[in-house]
Image (tube, helix red, strand yellow):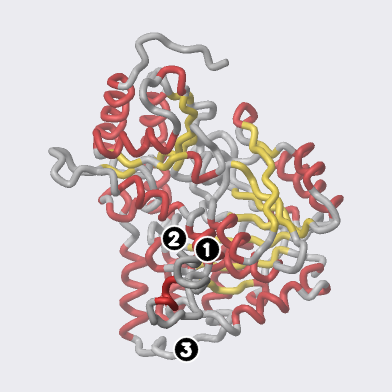
Amino acid sequence: MEEENGGKPEAEAEGEKRWRFGANKALAAAGGRSIRGTLNKVIACVEETGPRPMITLGNGDPSLFPSFRTTPIAEDAIVEAVRSAQYNNYAPTNGLLPARQAVAEYLSKDLPYQLSPDDVFITAGCAQAIEIVITALARPDANILLPRPGFPMYEARCTFNHVEMRHFDLIPEKGWEFDLDQVEKLADENTVAIVLINPNNPCGSVLKYEHMKEIAKTAMKLGIMVISDEVYDHLTFGSNPFVPMGALGDIVPVITLGSISKRWVVPGWRLGWIITTDPKHILRKTKFVDSIRSYLDITTDPATFIQGAVPQMINNTKADFFNNIIHVLRDSAEISYNRIKDIKCITCPHKPEASMFVMVKLNMSYLDNISDDVEFCSKLAKEESVIVLPGSALEMKNWLRITFAVEPTSLVVAIERLESFCKRHERVEQISPG
């Protein structure tokens, strides 16, 4: 076309203005890694005129279901904060002092030392906490060690900030423990951090204290910090108790990320935190904390009235509320595991014992006319109106992440539809995986 127009671009040849702006390719690349983007593509496959309502086992938001409604304590705290007229103003960039004090006291209960409000930075949910920490770490040639499978927000933020990602494997046969030999081989002089998610999304596992100590020692040996994503803290119902990584802060500096989203079942309230669990003050000596403060000065804050409600929420919520949520999750995890393990084409290597998810592996040799996990999820959505997340979104091709934090009756129906789908697409003659 340029030759036909005397070498000029087509737009100029036709007398049109050539604009100098366009899409940000880094944003497009980062957005392509998101869970939301992947799920939206799967949901688009659902037949609008289908005879059955859609059931989503794709994301970790059970707040719409009656069994997972938040406590009235939290709702009353929000109402009182709004009606007090004390929280209509801007908050300090690191968060309101009472909110930081309440979070510090809440987290200190599980630590061998007392956190200070100065160790706490309030954020707009855990997602913004990830954004801030990855941005603060970004520098030319830096790389970060990320778990596979993991939470793709880390990959998205690394992509946007031009930070190299190096993935190490979690081992399903060992309860999704770290492959620490691989971690050491991946690290070099430009490695700045390793990410840990515990309790785990997407695996539904809880790390043992002994293994966490080995992770801390490995990070210390490599001279890197640990970013510990603990947004599902205490949502455990198996044999392994939750231990915060900050308990090992005397071995290696730990940045702990968390929020009220999951334990109080209010993800839309967008209140999270960054914690420097670092009794030796290495993060301050290296000026990393200064980078966090600098970023907070140029970003948005969580709503002030939400911050104002935090002390009442944390201090007044009864144990019965938390115990009930755990009870429902435990029952739902049992339903998922026991029913899914009877489906031929799906293998569940580890029974979920925490969070809201389970990772299962597809055996493609049992399936006909389905090429991979993305096609499996797309056809499942179209034929059964059931939504699950393809493992490819988590760097795990031909795996699925299934959310069991839904109403138990809906969960049973969804798994029945999943089983029907698998039977309908079952290969008559099984082919060898090799």
Q: Which quadrant of the figure has residue 72?
A: bottom left
Query: Could you tell me the amino acid type at mark 1?
Result: Cys
In the displayed orientation, state which residue is furthest to the top: 429
Q: Residue 230: where, in percent of width, then height?
A: 57, 54
On screen, residue 278 versus residue 96, left or right, reads right
Query: Could you tell me the amino acid type at mark 3?
Result: Tyr
Q: Quick one: label 1 or label 2, which is nearer the N terminus?
A: 1
Q: Residue 216: where, in percent of width, then height?
A: 77, 49
Q: Which residue occupies 43% across, 29% down? A: 371
Is residue 431 shown to the viewer in this render?
yes
Q: Nearer the viewer, residue 314 or 165?
A: 165
- Residue at mark 2: 261
Q: Nearer the viewer, residue 423 or 28?
A: 28
Tag 1 secondary structure: helix
Report the Cα–Cα distance between label 1 and label 3. 20 Å
Q: Which residue occupies 55% across, 38% down? A: 396
Mark sitting on residue 126: 1
- Residue at mark 3: 90
Q: Is residue 424 above or below residue 164?
A: above
Q: Quick one: label 1 or label 3, which is nearer the N terminus?
A: 3
